[in-house]
Image (cartoon, grey):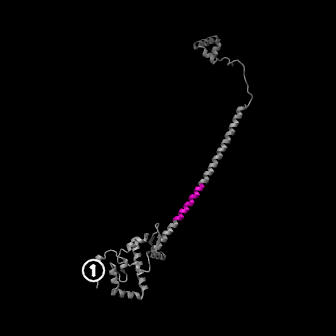
Amino acid sequence: MPRAEVGSTKHLANKMKSKGLQRLRWYCQVCEKQCRDANGFKCHVQSESHVRQMHVVGEDPKKYIEQFSREFQHDFIQLLRTSHGEKAVNINHFYQNYIANKEHTHMNATKWPSLTEFAKYLGREGICTVSEDEKGGLMVAWRDVSPAAVKRRAEIREAQLADAETEAHEERVMKRMLARAKMEAEEKAAREEKAKAEAEARGEATTKEESQKMEMPAGPVKLNFSMKKPLGQPGKVGLGQMKSKSIFKRVREETAKEQDVPAEKRTKVG
């Protein structure tokens, strides 16, 4: 039965029926035809076009397998580069995004039997960085091997090494400064202890000398046991006498003394 013409009602109906993903087992990669059920796939395999195409592929199967493998790898890497860049992503989750396109190249037509083997191949060839996550799943990240990217990574690596050397140098300087400060602090503490000990020794010696001076007098001690009062100078009135006499009495006594003095002496004095 011939195919429906593009744009016809039957063609649109077939497109609507085949909307979404179908069974991979009912897909023919050689003819790039997706069948909706087992009966449709059986009819397609027995069709003249499929048999003719299989004869062509049978002449050199390795050539076609290699071609399908290159197409699968190219489409896979292109989608990984454009959607995630160099960020790591779970390969199973990403493969679901890849096969969302109905016209993609299926893995069963390539030389890789499973997605795990394909991930190992990408890691061996250096195309992607493959690692294992905590749950045991495979993480794949695209590697940019262009000259500009390689140069950029080299510059970043050199900058990181320079920063590490600078940090190491600063750490060594800080360690030397700390050791020097610690040594100076120990020397200062030792000097202070020594000065304190010397000051205490000098203080003890001074205290001992002062006690010895207080115990032993410098000369003989003279004691006066007489009961006589010291006499004042003659002709001078003592402080006690002046206090005991009143002012008027002293004036009268001085006037009497002046009258007893001869007139000649008063004249000479005057």
Residue type (three-letter) at the residue carrying disc 1: His
In the foreground, 203 or 70: 70
Q: How many marks?
A: 1
Element on which disc 1 rests: helix
Tell me: 249 left or right of 221. Answer: left
Magenta part, dominant SS: helix
Residue 255 in percent (x, y) is at 60, 12
Magenta residue check for 238 = no
Residue tagged 1: 11
Residue at 55% over, 62% down: 169
**The quarter of the displayed image where residue 95 is located:** bottom left
In the foreground, 156 or 79: 79
Q: Residues within 10 Å of mark 1 (few under 14, many from 20)?
A: some
Residue at 58% over, 56% down: 178
In the foreground, 241 or 48: 48
Magenta residue check for 179 = yes
Which quadrant is home to the C terminus? top right
Relative to 192, residue 122 above or below: below
**The quarter of the displayed image where residue 31 is located:** bottom left
In the foreground, 107 or 223: 107
Would residue 82 be seen by someone viewing this image from the given angle?
no
Would residue 266 be seen by someone viewing this image from the given angle?
yes
Which quadrant is home to the N terminus? bottom left
Tell me: 184 left or right of 46. Answer: right
Residue 18 in percent (x, y) is at 31, 76
* In the image, farthest residue toward the right: 220
Q: Which residues are magenta?
A: 163-180
Relative to 72, residue 194 above or below: above
Residue at 61% over, 52% down: 184
Residue 198 in percent (x, y) is at 67, 44
